[in-house]
């Protein structure tokens, strides 16, 4: 359009879209409303994909997984205040998990917020976001849109990736500026993820720790999967002959049936290893903070590859910090690995003995037919289908459903398993599934506890609306963890952990045009899953699971505090 001097002008709406396009960011996951509805319409009109959700948390989770899969920040767009707050949970979760995403929310004008004059959806969103994300910026002037997006993109993907909040006051979108001037303000960020090469002496120190080890172990975290240094990571493991342990989202970096995988002997190798190389894995609660009985009685030497120097010594002393990006660090170790002697035969044979014993025990459990179907029978069926479909994305959450699926369902390719991650958060299911399916275009299977599914179940309508190839498998055991608790008072209210008995989640998806399956045996589950994946349409399989089969909080039972007071 032209201004009163007859000069061609553009506006904030268009410059936001131009900034995204200039940086190859082509998909927005969001939920419309004041003041972003027209921005979302314009995004679609200008060729970006806009995926509209039913709750902003799930849009944010989709953006986070898109970031994890592509190494470019996933984009989530919400309205102000309550919409922003709903997205904030996903932004915090992305930051904790080191997934790059940008939450863009419309906001109120500063002059009204700062005088607390009670604006529509008034909130100091920028300051509300800061404690829960990696960086937060507000853009007040149209001429700053290019630099503001550059800052947000670089903050999301450089160093340790994470969530960034970008605050756009409503008036910014309507501001105008001459087109020629505007074009100069938009640019593509140059080298947003600069390689960070480790110092030669640090590489030497790390190799020396490996040379002195009798029982070395390599631990792969989801950071190793995110790095997309797959060939070099595989070469480091295979050339060194060192056994490795993948954390849940690193499964598939090497096929889970790889001879050097120590997953089936996890407790043994964590306790017995005398040197541990951490690749994109933090010694946090998931690894018992690197100390205590999990790690055995003898002291261990730790080598830690990390892009953030102050993560080192977070829990235990690190003998060889290797600071840099994972690709560069692994590449440097590879150059010197030939000089590292292969692990002692007795270490490898001790691990294989443990693996064979534990795998035989698991095979025995999986072979048992149980009626009603239990977690193991259901997951054996899913394991067999995934083995035939290694390209399928697998999303997983729940308690028993999460713990058993991680152990039983092998993954064969990198960045195919997306789960509750560092926070153990429930509710990631449908958002992660949509993010993975939209980003990859590949069939996606979400293996969900029935409680976990409930957090994002309304997004089944979103899945059907975009006709996404997502099959949701609900492990229905009538409650949180299990379905058997009773109200001790005998009152009308059911126990806190119990749901509607024999709920038919398969009927839910039929309401939106999807295909529902109701299965009660592993054979029925296997057949339904094969069919649903092949059809590539939105589907939900309601898998009836024995309501007595679960344990409270799965493997985290011990984290529950218990009352010492007992009954009054
Ligand atoms: C956001 C959120 N709310 C609540 C929890 C607590 N929680 C909850 C509610 C779980 C659900 C377990 O029930 P389920 O039906 O999903 O799984 P299983 O039947 O497989 O045990 S697992 C768990 O840690 C959580 N982790 N995250």
Image (cartoon, rainbow, N blue to C red):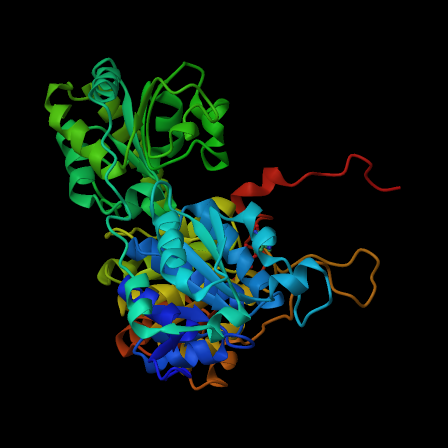
Residue 347 percent coordinates (x, y)? 25, 21
Q: Quadrant of ligand 1?
A: bottom right
- Which quarter of the rendering shows the N terminus? bottom left
Which of these two is toward me, 148 or 242? Answer: 148
Between 36 and 472, the one nearer to me in the picture: 36
Q: Position of residue 82 (x, y in %)?
A: 62, 66
334 relative to 255, above or below: above
Pick out the residue farthest to the front. 5
Q: Is residue 509 left or right of residue 253?
A: right
Question: In the picture provided, is 137 more to the left or to the right than 256?
Answer: right
Residue 166 picture location, percent across and down: 47, 58
On screen, residue 252 versus residue 83, left or right, reads left
Q: Please tell me which residue is depicted at 18% across the width and 27% down the height of the picture.
A: 333
Which corner quadrant of the image does residue 396 belong to?
A: bottom left
Q: Say left or right for 29 vs 195.
A: right
Front position in the image: 371 or 549? 549
Quadrant (top left, top right, bottom left, bottom right) of the C terminus: top right
- Residue 524 visible, this orientation: no
Residue 193 lies, with reference to residue 302, above or below; the image says: below
* Residue 105, visible in the rendered structure: yes
Residue at screen point 38% across, 33% down: 308
Depicted 274 relative to depicted 2: above or below? above
Percent coordinates x, y for residue 303 in the rendering: 32, 23
Residue at the right extreme of this rendering = 568
Q: How many marks?
A: 0
Quarter holding residue 346: top left
């Amino acid at each position: 359009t032209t201004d009163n001097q007859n000069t061609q002008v553009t506006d904030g709406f268009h410059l936001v879209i131009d900034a995204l396009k200039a940086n190859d960011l082509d998909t927005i996951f969001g939920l419309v409303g004041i003041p972003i509805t027209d921005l979302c319409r314009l995004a679609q009109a200008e060729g970006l994909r806009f995926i509209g959700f039913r709750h902003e948390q799930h849009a944010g989770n989709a953006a986070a997984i898109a970031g994890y899969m592509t190494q470019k920040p996933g984009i989530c767009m919400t309205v102000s205040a309550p919409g922003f707050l709903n997205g904030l949970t996903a932004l915090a979760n992305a930051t904790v998990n080191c997934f790059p995403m940008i939450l863009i929310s419309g906001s109120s004008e500063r002059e009204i917020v700062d005088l607390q004059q009670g604006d529509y959806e008034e909130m100091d969103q920028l300051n509300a976001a800061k404690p829960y994300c990696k960086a937060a910026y507000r853009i007040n002037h149209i001429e700053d849109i290019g630099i503001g997006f550059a800052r947000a993109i670089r903050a999301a993907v450089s160093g340790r990736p994470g969530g960034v909040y970008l605050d756009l006051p409503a008036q910014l979108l309507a501001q105008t500026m001459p087109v020629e001037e505007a074009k100069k303000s938009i640019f593509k960020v140059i080298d947003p993820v600069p390689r960070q090469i480790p110092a030669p002496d640090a590489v030497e120190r790390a190799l020396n720790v490996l040379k002195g080890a009798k029982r070395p172990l390599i631990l792969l975290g989801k950071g190793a999967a995110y790095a997309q240094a797959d060939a070099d990571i595989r070469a480091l493991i295979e050339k060194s002959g060192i056994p490795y342990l993948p954390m849940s989202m690193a499964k598939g970096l090497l096929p889970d049936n790889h001879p050097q995988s120590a997953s089936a002997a996890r407790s043994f190798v964590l306790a017995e290893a005398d040197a541990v190389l951490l690749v994109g894995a933090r010694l946090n609660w998931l690894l018992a903070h690197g100390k205590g009985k999990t790690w055995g009685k003898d002291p261990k030497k730790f080598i830690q590859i990390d892009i953030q120097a102050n993560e080192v010594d977070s829990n235990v002393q690190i003998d060889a910090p290797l600071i840099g990006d994972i690709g560069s660090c692994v590449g440097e170790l590879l150059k010197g690995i030939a000089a590292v002697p292969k692990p002692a035969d007795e270490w490898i044979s001790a691990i294989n003995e443990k693996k064979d014993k534990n795998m035989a025990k698991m095979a025995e459990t999986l072979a048992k037919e149980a009626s009603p179907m239990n977690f193991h029978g259901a997951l054996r069926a899913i394991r067999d289908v995934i083995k035939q479909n290694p390209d399928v994305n697998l999303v997983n959450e729940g308690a028993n459903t999460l713990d058993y699926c991680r152990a039983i369902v092998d993954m064969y390719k990198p960045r195919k398993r997306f789960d509750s991650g560092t926070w153990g958060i429930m509710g990631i299911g449908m958002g992660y599934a949509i993010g993975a399916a939209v980003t990859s275009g590949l069939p996606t299977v979400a293996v969900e506890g029935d409680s976990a599914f409930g957090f994002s179940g309304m997004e089944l309508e979103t899945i059907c609306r975009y006709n996404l190839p997502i099959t949701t498998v609900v492990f229905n055991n009538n409650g949180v963890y299990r379905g058997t608790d009773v109200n001790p008072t005998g009152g009308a209210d059911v126990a806190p952990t119990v749901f509607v008995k024999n709920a038919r989640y398969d009927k839910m998806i039929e309401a939106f045009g999807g295909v529902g399956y109701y299965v009660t045996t592993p054979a029925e589950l296997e057949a339904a899953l094969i069919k649903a994946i092949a059809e590539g349409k939105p589907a939900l399989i309601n898998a009836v699971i024995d309501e007595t089969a679960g344990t409270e909080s799965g493997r985290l039972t011990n984290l529950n505090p218990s009352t010492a007071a007992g009954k009054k």
